[in-house]
DNA sequence: CGCCATCTTGATGTATTTCAAAGAGCGTGG
DNA sequence: CCACGCTCTTTGAAATACATCAAGATGGCG
């Protein structure tokens, strides 16, 4: 069996969970997947919904969020190209999953992923390894929320986003609004904005306009991110 | 093969990850484990240490914590009877693991767990399912840290601890000190204490002394825990 | 060009921290 | 058995970081 043409040109062939499958295994698996696009703001699934698809993000950024009793949204995390969204082994979604920009997905029935895990231990192993890594990352973030100042949260977020860019890139666009950023960091819009200008005034970043950002001093940014 | 005598009397035989193994599989696996005891305050492993054991908690409570640059401890979570501590698939620990009270463990070389996962898919599947559940629970907690008031955090913690007791039990002992509790909740000792007395004054709980607590009105406690 | 949403900035309020000290609980040794 | 000293907890008063309320400024887009 030869590699599915869709997979042959897939930008996340090496970084998504599919990387655990050889070309032969991928061929039959890929046949069960469909390509899908989301526009900014479009919802893939909602908390509490029956959740019968999982998807690899091929490009773009997604937010995972929940809505409180009082009706405001809390962003729990972002997912990027190469990440798997949706939860294998669970019948219902525990959060809303919403595109932040133009997103392309490779979407599978949850049952197909689960069947593939059954027959291909390497896939299950990689999904497990990622889940455990996510758990560690979540705990690090929890530490920041528990004790970090507003400045440290904003700095840590910017540092993460900067680190995610191709090496050597110091200017890029934040895909999320100040409001989403604040929600992700557990702050208000105003506080998030103030910390941004504080970092700008300290010469650590520049804000050329829109959602663009220039990292002037990544070391200082990292230092500001310390808890 | 017959059931290992140690497993026959194990209190968490049905709730630990071992429950995914039948008696035959358990027999050979159990031979690689050793029983171990920890006294209150005793450390099982430290963040950054080479981590070559994983252990099922048979009784007692453990805290997972990290130490910040400034030297103070942040508690990331608790683990109870039936939980697996230590991280399969990772060479190093990402947090300190310390006993809070008298703890009994069933400890395995990490390599033994990993080998058992290789040969027994049901074990790996259960570990994966737990990791994903922990991830969900972590996100719920993250939401509380991001937006919840001090009162809501304390109430949520007490509600969790109450729910963990045998059905019908309304009085029990908190295994952790106010200091640990505050650290877990991302608060100061003083604030944690004040919220406890606030709940007491509202008639939701009683504090007969020491670390004992009586849940008088669990509904009200749950309501106070809302974000 | 002008509208609308998003972002920034300022002034004020408040929950939580910080600083400080008194009060319980508990084991030790007289 | 009680006094002493230790740690943990509670309570009070002052300081502060962040939220809230309220305008402006900026930028995208028709």
Image (spheres, coloured by chain):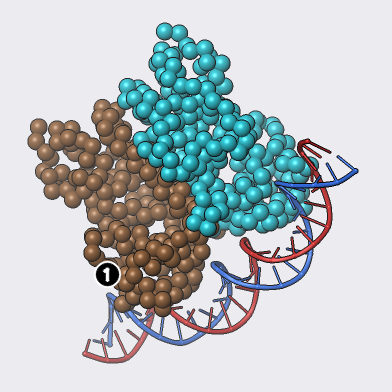
Chain colours: A cyan, B brown, C blue, D red
Q: Which residue is mark 1?
A: B171
Question: Residue furthest toward the left?
Answer: B2
Q: Is residue B221 left or right of residue A193?
A: left
Between residue B215 and residue A145, name the one nearer to us: B215
For the C terminus of chain A, the image quarter is bottom right
The residue sitting at 45% across, 71% down in the picture is B195
Other-residue count near label 1 (Cα within 10 Å), few / some / many at <14 / 14–19 / ≥20: some
The residue sitting at 59% across, 51% down in the picture is A183
The chain under label 1 reads: B
Q: Is residue A207 left or right of residue A27?
A: right
Q: How many marks can you see?
A: 1
**Secondary structure beneath label 1:** strand
The residue sitting at 32% across, 22% down in the picture is A119
Between residue A140 and residue D4, name the one nearer to us: A140
Between residue D26 and residue B13, name the one nearer to us: D26
The picture places residue B113, in percent across and down from the top left corner, at 29, 35
Between residue B38 and residue A78, name the one nearer to us: A78
The picture places residue A140, in percent across and down from the top left corner, at 50, 48
The picture places residue A24, in percent across and down from the top left corner, at 41, 12
The picture places residue A123, in percent across and down from the top left corner, at 39, 26
Question: In this picture, is B5 found above or below B174?
Answer: above
For the N terminus of chain A, the image quarter is top left
Question: In this picture, is B114 found above or below B180?
Answer: above
């Amino acid at each position: 069996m030869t590699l599915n043409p869709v997979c042959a040109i897939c930008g996340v062939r090496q970084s998504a969970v599919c990387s655990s499958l050889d070309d032969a295994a991928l061929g039959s698996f890929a046949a069960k997947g469909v390509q899908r696009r989301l526009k900014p703001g479009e919802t893939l699934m909602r908390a509490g919904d029956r959740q019968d698809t999982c998807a690899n993000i091929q490009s773009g950024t997604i937010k995972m969020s929940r809505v409180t009793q009082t009706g405001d949204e809390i962003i729990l995390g972002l997912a990027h190209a190469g990440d798997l969204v949706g939860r294998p082994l669970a019948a219902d979604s525990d959060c809303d999953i919403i595109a932040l920009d133009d997103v392309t997905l490779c979407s599978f029935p949850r049952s197909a992923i689960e069947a593939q895990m059954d027959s291909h231990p390497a896939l299950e192993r990689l999904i497990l390894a990622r889940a455990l890594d996510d758990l560690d990352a979540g705990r690090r973030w929890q530490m920041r929320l528990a004790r970090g100042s507003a400045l440290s949260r904003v700095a840590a977020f910017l540092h993460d986003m900067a680190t995610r860019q191709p090496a050597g890139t110091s200017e890029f666009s934040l895909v999320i609004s100040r409001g989403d950023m604040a929600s992700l960091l557990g702050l208000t819009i105003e506080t998030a904005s103030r910390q941004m200008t504080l970092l700008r005034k300290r010469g650590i970043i520049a804000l050329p306009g829109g959602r663009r950002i220039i990292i002037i001093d990544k070391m200082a940014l990292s230092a500001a991110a310390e808890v």
